[in-house]
Image: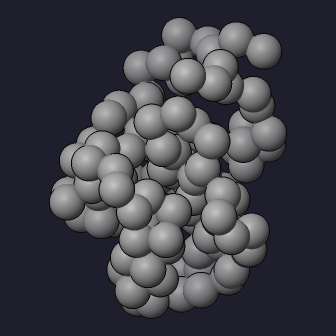
């Protein structure tokens, strides 16, 4: 399954040092049930952040550890920081992809 032009425009390489601020800023602009997916450069590990109704967030981690959490928005920074260290230990940049529907998370990317 190939990427549509809209998905390609939403993909960006972001410095790992600014990814927390970029994620929080982008999540404010997204309507539920949309969200953000953070992927490694090779796209084999990642973290999906899905915005739910009434200030809840679902975080899906796939890579070294497989888990799914439901947390409030005020706990997002702490959880995301530990997940970033676990999933991207030596990375300098990660891919940030915005999506409108959680069903888009099942798409296949070309492995690099």
Residue furthest toward the front? 90
Q: Nearer the viewer, residue 69 or 94?
A: 94
Horizontal and vertical percent position of residue 82: 44, 80
Q: Is residue 15 visible?
A: yes
Identify the residue at image location x=78%, y=15%: 1
Horizontal and vertical percent position of residue 74: 41, 88
Horizontal and vertical percent position of residue 65: 68, 70
Is residue 95 toward the left or the right of residue 110 in the image? left
Q: Picture quarter containing residue 95?
A: top left
The answer to whether residue 3 is above or below residue 15 is above
Identify the residue at image location x=34%, y=50%: 91
The answer to whether residue 55 is above or below residue 105 is below
The image's colour scheme reads one colour
Horizontal and vertical percent position of residue 92: 26, 48
Q: Picture quarter containing residue 56?
A: bottom right
The answer to whether residue 60 is above or below residue 92 is below
Identify the residue at image location x=59%, y=74%: 57
Q: Nearer the viewer, residue 29 or 72?
A: 72
Is residue 77 toward the left or the right of residue 8 in the image? left
Q: Quadrant of the C terminus?
A: top right
Is residue 8 toward the left or the right of residue 14 in the image? right
Q: Nearer the viewer, residue 72 or 53?
A: 72
């Amino acid at each position: 399954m190939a990427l549509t032009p809209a998905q390609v425009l939403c993909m960006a390489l972001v410095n790992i040092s600014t990814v927390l601020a970029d994620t929080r800023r982008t999540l404010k602009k997204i309507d539920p049930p949309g969200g953000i997916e953070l992927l490694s450069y090779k796209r084999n590990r990642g973290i999906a952040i899905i915005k739910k109704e009434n200030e809840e967030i679902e975080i899906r981690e796939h890579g070294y550890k497989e888990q799914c959490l439901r947390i409030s928005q005020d706990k997002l920074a702490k959880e995301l920081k530990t997940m970033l260290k676990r999933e991207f230990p030596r990375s300098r940049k990660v891919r940030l992809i915005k999506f409108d529907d959680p069903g888009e998370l099942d798409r296949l990317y070309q492995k690099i």
